[in-house]
Image: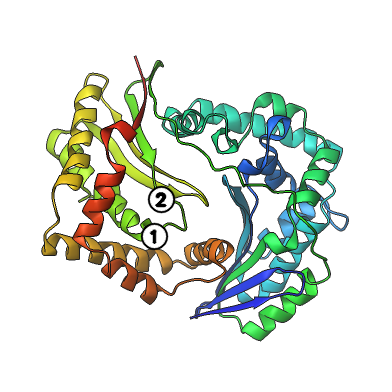
Amino acid sequence: MYQYHTLSNGIRIILSHTPSRVVYSGVYINVGSRDEAGADEGMAHFIEHSLFKGTTHRRAHHILNRIDGVGGELNAFTTKEETALYASSLVEHLPRCLELFADILFHSTFPDAEIEKEKDVVLEEINSYSDSPAELIYDQFEELAYEGHPLAHNILGSKRNVKHFTPDRLRCHLQQRYTPSRMVVTVAGDVHFDRLVRLCERYFGPYADRPATVDRSVKPQFHTFERHINRHTHQAHLLLGCEAPDVYHRDKTAFTLLNNILGGPAMNSRLNVAIRERYGFCYTIESQYVPFSDTGLFYLYAGVDLGAQQRVVELVRRELQLMADTLLSDRQLRQAQRQFIGQMAINNDLGLNEMQSIGKAFLNFDHVDTLEEMNADIMNVTAADLQRVARERFRPDLFSTLVYGS
């Protein structure tokens, strides 16, 4: 059972009460890399790094020691549509986590010397992605699939952009976009809700809301393509993908289950059995479903022997076609549903995962389904639903392919 509250400035609070000495807390913000353009591309990610570099109350080392010094962990990440700050700590240290979140979100100063050092850090992060084809291929696929739209550009931005970021531009970007009504405070732990609300009122309540200059009115268009890029790699990297349901679409649950059947984390996924176990063509083969607010992406990735790439593509397409042509038996459907429900329960049993999951859900829906409600939704998916979605989404003409290899 989740408890909710909204502060007068629009900041929303959600608590999952769990009996543990450890509490997981965070702030989810509805701002990401798609809310940038031109010379600002990469700004959200750079701000995420730079929030830890100094405030009007603290220097960088004070910020790092505030949580780490009591045995906790402090971190952050940026996606296409969100930025998140989060921490793990003992329950008694929750107030210092919340106070620190508020301090760095509303009082960051972006000191010149620290920003110059952080540029080097981010430039090295960009270099590391360039050296990892298994990660780079996803970014390049999105650049091709959403060409001309803000969703296309890399979260990290370009080296040229990063080198030209200034403290003034960072402060302006933060002020214009990271507004209270776009924030959710999310907590999982053994915390009394009334106390959590009082703490949030104390640390977040004084900051008035303001209009945010975030515009997502232009819906992205998915472009199909076939691209082979020569790279000196020890294996071929394959990525096949198509447009998928957005986060609000009626088919989201069915497609999530469909993705799990095809290439989820379990060893018995159809792609793993059909390609890795049966033929030994690859070490890694998986699928991912990433729903955004107004579109979604479905990926199939494999790292394969250089001589087997065409055969693997054929086998992948065969598995997709089987999902569209063949109705699952009652036994197969129930097995897939039970497996996914079990995976969700195990994932949510980890407090950090639950805190992040409910924060993102509350940010998008202003409500979070309980595990029991999600289980019921999964059990309501029929074999006909799965086949219909597969037929609609897995048509060969809707897929794009990107290959890295010789």
What is the secondary structure assignment of the residue under circle 1? loop
**Circle 2: element type:** loop
* Residue 107 x %, y %: 83, 56
Question: Which residue occupies the extreme right position in the image?
Answer: 56
Give whichever of 241, 191 is nearer the camera.
241
Residue 226 in the image: above or below residue 73: above
Q: Tell me if residue 272 can be seen.
A: yes
Q: Quadrant of residue 66 in the image?
A: bottom right
Residue that label 2 marks: 245
Q: What amino acid does circle 1 point to? A: Arg
Colour option used: rainbow
Q: Indicate which disc, 2 or 1, sits on the residue closer to the N terminus.
A: 2
Q: In this view, does 224 lie above or below 299?
A: above
Q: Name the residue under label 1.
A: 250
Left or right: residue 116 versus residue 281 is right
Compare residues 35 and 282 and report the one nearer the observer.
35
| Mark 1 surroundings within 10 Å by alpha-carbon count, few (fewer than 14), some (14 through 19), many (20 or more) | few
- The alpha-carbon separation of the residues under discs 2 and 1 comes to 8 Å
